Image (cartoon, grey):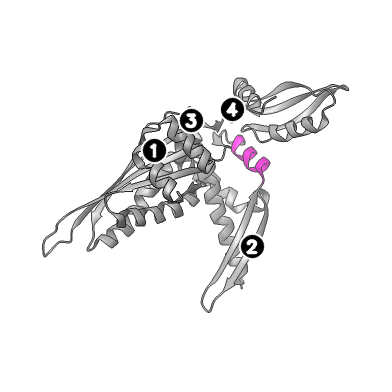
Amino acid sequence: GQTPRNIGLAKAENRAFTILFNRMLTRVNQDFNRDFLDILRREKKRYIERSIVRSERRRLRSFQMTVDITFSKKEVSEAFARTGMAHGQSEYPQSLLVIKANTQSNLDKFRAIILTTAKQYGISLAMPLGDMDDMLNLTWEKAKQADPAFQSWVHNRYGLQRTWAVYINLISQPGDPSNPPYYSATAHLIETAQQEDNPPIQARSQGTFPSIKQAQAALFPTVAKQLLQQAGNRWISNHSVEPTLRHHIPLRIVHNFNHLRYEQFLQSLQLIPGFSGFTHQSMTAREVIIQVDYQGRDHTLLSAIAQLGV
């Protein structure tokens, strides 16, 4: 009794929840709170603000949709806060992906897989242009070394602050007439960014397959998923909101009649991770005092405000 459009929309919303949880919660938190997250999915009308169908394509035996899903930041954050669940509210910054592999085939296959898998974790990876400038300046070795001059070049050319240097290696041990070859895939990820020093991330998978193409198809998604899970978990852990630290902070804003700048500041304030809202406490012609509802430590909020340039 369901139309293909309604079925597709329901599947899209369910998939959007998966991407949202991957962006905001570590794998441990997701596994530990599985029942609670399933309740959020069932009560989706409360947490989804709108679902917009961008395109539809009907075929004889298939129906494809592209859907934009927008969640309520307030409702989702408060749901996590009620359970005392630490969660991330900072989007993972777009990163330039630089890959090195032991063969061109491995590089091409792994690149396509990691770009597709990254979308499931809310991680946006940009590919190099591959022109002459890249050939002269953009190498895996330079990306691995995180040289300041190289990072400056990446920022000037691509406008990105972060680089992923990934090395993928697929090796095989010959089988015999009764057994197919044994394959082992390993990957190393080095994240480089200004003022950050993250240890490398490693992933590994192995198995027996009749051909190298089947080994790539089975092992590379597993390895890519391991890298992305670890990178996502590290980012969320370093940028988590702590609901148990929720409290109110009085904030005095002296605007001196610069109302446009004042409104811009209030809008920027609402994008700070851990911000849950504010109320006006007092107001004069030149200044305002507001009470900020905040989940985190005071010095973290002050550092975020300082980065706004006020």
Mark 4 lies on residue: 244
Foreground: disc 4 or disc 3:
3
Query: Residue at the location (60% across, 20% down)?
Result: 299
How far apart, in angstroms, are the residues tagged by discs 4 and 1? 39 Å
How far apart, in angstroms, are the residues tagged by discs 2 and 3? 37 Å
Q: Looking at the picture, which amino acid does disc 1 mark?
A: Ala
Of pointers 2 and 4, the one earlier in the residue sequence: 2
How far apart, in angstroms, are the residues tagged by discs 3 and 1? 12 Å
Of pointers 2 and 1, the one earlier in the residue sequence: 2
Q: Residue furthest right?
A: 285
Query: Residue at the location (34% across, 38% down)?
Result: 141
Of pointers 3 and 1, the one earlier in the residue sequence: 1
Say left or right for 17 vs 280: left
Q: Looking at the picture, which amino acid does disc 2 mark?
A: Arg
Q: Main secondary structure of the magenta part?
A: helix
The residue segment tinted magenta is: 72-81
Residues at discs 4 and 1 in contact (Cβ within 8 Å)? no
Please tell me the numbered disc located at residue 143: 1
Query: Residue at the location (82% across, 28% down)?
Result: 258
Residues at discs 2 and 3 in contact (Cβ within 8 Å)? no
Of pointers 4 and 3, the one earlier in the residue sequence: 3
In terms of secondary structure, where does tag 2 sit? strand
Please tell me the numbered disc located at residue 194: 3
Residues at discs 2 and 1 in contact (Cβ within 8 Å)? no
Mark 2 lies on residue: 54
Is disc 3 surrounded by few (<14), some (14 to 19) or many (20+) residues within 10 Å? Answer: few
Give the answer, above or below, for where 284 lies relative to 64.
above
Query: Residue at the location (45% across, 55% down)?
Result: 116
To which quarter of the image does residue 180 belong? bottom left
